[in-house]
Image (tube, grey):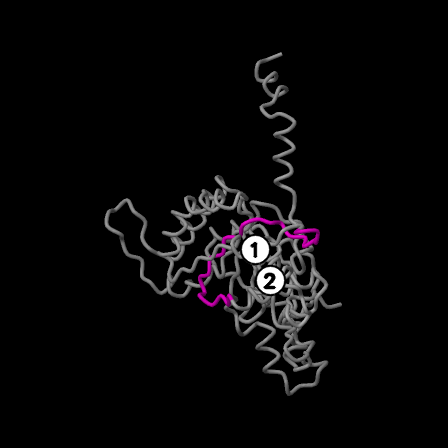
């Protein structure tokens, strides 16, 4: 038997190491609407849709599932108790809404329907437990805001040091990396004429080069710290979207309007405009949009109805959900 065959049989991992590696790569059990496809570290999930289509709400709910503990003082919360790294490139993250959703989730797990503890007559000790849990969850949420591509790139290049400090500080590893939105600087970078940065061996500043560097830095980061990446992206094909079609066809009968919108949606539901380097980096893709029920004014007060489908992998199923004060709820 050759030495190569012997080395292959003997292997280089113990049973304990194999189990630890496999356990780390188990799929995440995420809440709807991200529950249909098993997602693992290393996957890149792109959430596409016009504004508004609840893309940021989906990120918020996924982040809350990650920062919540699995159990806390005898109460089951079903969270992952991991760190979340959130890049806000749109600069529109609503921290008040995020904390509201987190509090609603904590109260719901405690069997309370309202986030106001005083209305339920909760004792002072329970109130402090609630505050301790809330603060521990928020500490596992790391927020970074960038105002342009250069700032985003410089942050990515130094992010490994920050990530290592966060891991050591909390004693847990980061599992989620979120970018909202990867297309935030698309028009600015596209309008910027390529120019040399000094020497002839350096790349010019252009949209494709920026995205190429972003992908490379994220890949380097994943080698050190494997994570599940979520990135939102706005659609730019207004003339083919369901929203614009419905607005133009409100004067038509419902059957005629719906059939016309359906044909338009099937034809122009999604148009790719990002450079190929980013397209090849994406492993999963969902397309979100405003539901026709919401556009027709049939939705309840303080609730918005949206629909989505999986494009990659293609499931050929449209599902609907509503965004209420307490979060996202799937509809039949």
In the image, farthest residue toward the left: 198
Using the image as rendered, state which of residue 308 and residue 114 is in the foreground.
114
Is 193 positioned to the left or the right of 320 in the image?
A: left
How far across and how far down the image is residue 194, in percent? 31, 58
Q: Residue placed at 57% from the left, 14% from the top?
A: 3
Q: Looking at the image, how many numbered discs can be counted on the residues?
A: 2
Q: Residue placed at 70% from the left, 53% from the top?
A: 76
In the image, farthest residue toward the front: 124
Using the image as rendered, state which of residue 122 and residue 96 is in the foreground.
122
Work out whether mark 2 precedes mark 1 in sequence or the reverse, and give the earlier one.
2
How far across and how far down the image is residue 308, in percent? 64, 65
Where residue 127 sits, quadrant-wise, is bottom right
Secondary structure state at the residue bearing disc 2: helix
> Residue 102 got which mark?
2
Is 75 positioned to the left or the right of 205 in the image?
A: right
Are circles 2 and 1 on residues that touch, CB within 8 Å? yes
Is the residue marked by circle 1 packed among few (<14), some (14-19), or many (20+) residues within 10 Å? many
Segment tinted magenta in the rendering: 72-95
In the image, farthest residue toward the right: 332
32 up-or-down from 19: above or below: below
Residue tagged 1: 137
Using the image as rendered, state which of residue 315 and residue 26 is in the foreground.
26
How far across and how far down the image is residue 213, in percent? 40, 49
Q: Residue placed at 51% from the left, 46% from the top?
A: 170
> Residue 228 got which mark?
none
Secondary structure state at the residue bearing disc 1: helix
């Amino acid at each position: 038997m050759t030495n190569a065959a012997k080395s292959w049989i003997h292997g280089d991992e113990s049973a304990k190491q194999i189990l630890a590696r496999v356990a780390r790569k188990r799929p995440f059990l995420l809440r709807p609407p991200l529950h249909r496809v098993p997602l693992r570290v290393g996957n890149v999930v792109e959430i596409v849709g016009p504004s508004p289509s609840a893309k940021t709400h989906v990120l918020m709910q996924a982040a809350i599932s990650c920062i919540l503990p699995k159990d806390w003082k005898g109460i089951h919360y079903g969270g992952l108790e991991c760190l979340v790294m959130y890049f806000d490139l749109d600069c529109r993250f609503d921290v008040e809404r995020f904390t509201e959703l987190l509090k609603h989730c904590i109260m719901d797990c405690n069997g309370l329907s309202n986030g106001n503890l005083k209305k339920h007559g909760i004792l002072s000790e329970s109130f402090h437990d609630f505050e301790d849990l809330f603060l521990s969850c928020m500490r596992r949420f790391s927020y970074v805001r960038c105002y342009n591509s250069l700032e985003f790139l410089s942050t990515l290049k130094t992010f490994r040091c920050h990530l290592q400090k966060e891991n050591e500080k909390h004693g847990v590893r980061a599992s989620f990396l979120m970018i909202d939105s990867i297309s935030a600087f698309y028009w600015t970078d596209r309008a910027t004429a390529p120019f040399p940065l000094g020497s002839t061996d350096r790349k010019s500043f252009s949209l494709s080069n920026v995205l190429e560097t972003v992908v490379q830095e994220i890949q380097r980061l994943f080698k050190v710290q494997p994570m599940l990446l979520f990135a939102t992206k706005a659609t730019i094909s207004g003339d083919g979207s369901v929203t614009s079609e419905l607005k133009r066809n409100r004067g038509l009968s419902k059957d005629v309007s719906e059939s016309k919108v359906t044909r338009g949606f099937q034809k122009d539901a999604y148009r790719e405009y990002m450079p190929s380097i980013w397209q090849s980096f994406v492993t999963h893709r969902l397309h979100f949009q405003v539901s026709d029920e919401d556009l027709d004014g049939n939705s309840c007060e303080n609730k918005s109805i949206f629909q989505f489908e999986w494009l990659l992998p293609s499931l050929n199923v449209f599902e609907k959900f509503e965004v209420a004060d307490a979060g996202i709820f799937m509809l039949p």
